[in-house]
Amino acid sequence: MSSEAPQTPAIEDPQIGLKLIPEQASEYAQQVDFLYYALLGISGLLMGILAALVVVFAVRYRRSLRRERGELIAERSGRRLEIGFALLLCLSFIGLFYWGSQLYLHLYSATDADVTIDAVGKQWMWKFQHPDGTREINTLHLPVGETVALRITSQDVIHSLSLPAFRLKRDAVPGMYTRAQFTPTRAGTYRLFCAEYCGTDHARMRGKVVVLERADYQQWLAGKVDVPDRAEAGAQLFQSLGCGACHKADGSGLAPALQGVFGSRVKLADGSEVVADEAYIRDSIVEPQAQLVAGYQPVMPSFSGQVSEEEILQLISYIQSLGQSREADEQ
């Protein structure tokens, strides 16, 4: 039984009406706005200085003015002025770059989160799955005050998940996972868009984010249909696909054991090593021969087209539940 809701269009709500600048619904949003206003301020100041100089020079040195031009600017003082102005601009833009890079790394780096939600883009809807197995389409419920991590991918073409109130926009690319995390700070209803043209009904690929108080969020989860969580659903799928016949826990099967493999370094048949992260596990499911583990034969069939992106994410959650390597825990 699935708790996936039917596809519905975004509900127009007074709180999410059109605004020049969306309201701030996360700590990150406030920081992004500060950077944005600083960039506007510096750009406006430079534009004002340049415009004023153009007017002053046009009037003072116009062709019809009859007077001795002489030396316009003393050579020595002119060089100092130019060098000082160039250094000031350089330092300003280096500062803006550092500020922006720190915000970017804070949003998109993989760190600990209170809740991780899977987001899958599909023509033309957004599908979300919570850790307990609850699914939504074009609506995303979040708890206020908790760090939320989104694990984003696409089932067909490139999409882009845009949450303006949280100042977040992240591409959903087929065959790979992107990640973003933020902490909602205000309860309310906010807009959700696809910001990448993805086909005929791209404009309809929108929805809403509903941020609830923690107690209300838990109550909302409790009111959904009882379904297995992601890891349990992945375990059921793992058995139904017959994966357990080869991936035996004691390592005696035709394929490597999966206990503690997530986050570890895996040695491949060609002598190289890779980290067993989400992308590696996905590739091993859909293209098992591409990165063959050392010591094993290429006997695993490809499950490309047999499992959906949501099911692959469930399998990944199940493998994560089997434990992480010491290397991953230390990171």
Image (tube, rainbow, N blue to C red):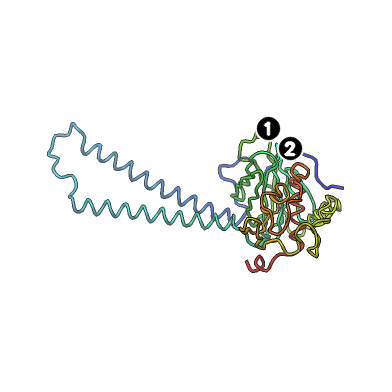
* Dot 1 amino acid type: Asp
Q: Image point 47% across, 57% down: which residue?
A: 98
Q: Which residue is mark 2?
A: 9
- Whether 274 is drawn above or below 49: the answer is below
Residue 266, horizontal then vertical, whole percent: 66, 60
Which quadrant would the C terminus be assigned to in this image? bottom right
For the residue marked with disc 2, what is the amino acid?
Pro
- Of residue 171 and residue 35, the one placed in the foreground of this image is 171
Q: Is residue 221 visible?
A: no
Q: Is residue 209 left or right of residue 251?
A: left
Residue drawn where x is 61% and y is 45% of the image: 171
Q: Position of residue 48 (x, y in %)?
A: 36, 44
Q: Position of residue 277 (x, y in %)?
A: 67, 57
Task: Report, in whole angstroms, how far the alpha carbon at label 1 lies from the one at label 2.
Answer: 12 Å
Report the residue at 48% width, 57% height from top: 99
Task: Determine the image quadrant of residue 87.
Answer: bottom left
Please tell me whether mark 1 or mark 2 is closer to you in this view: 1
Residue 201 bears which disc, if any? 1
Q: Give the residue at x 71% y 51%.
A: 284
- Would residue 331 appear left or right of 82 to someone viewing this image? right
Q: Which mark is residue 178?
A: none
Secondary structure beneath disc 2?
loop
Note whether residue 153 is visible. Answer: yes
Binning the other alpha carbons within 10 Å of mark 1 as few (below 14), some (14 to 19) or many (20 upward) gives: few
Seen from the viewer's position, the closer of residues 43 and 23 is 43
Q: Secondary structure at mark 1?
A: loop
Instruction: Reply above or below: 62 against 214.
Output: above
Looking at marks 1 and 2 on the same chain, the residue that comes earlier in the sequence is marked by 2
Is disc 2 surrounded by few (<14), some (14 to 19) or many (20+) residues within 10 Å?
some
Q: Position of residue 41 (x, y in %)?
A: 43, 49
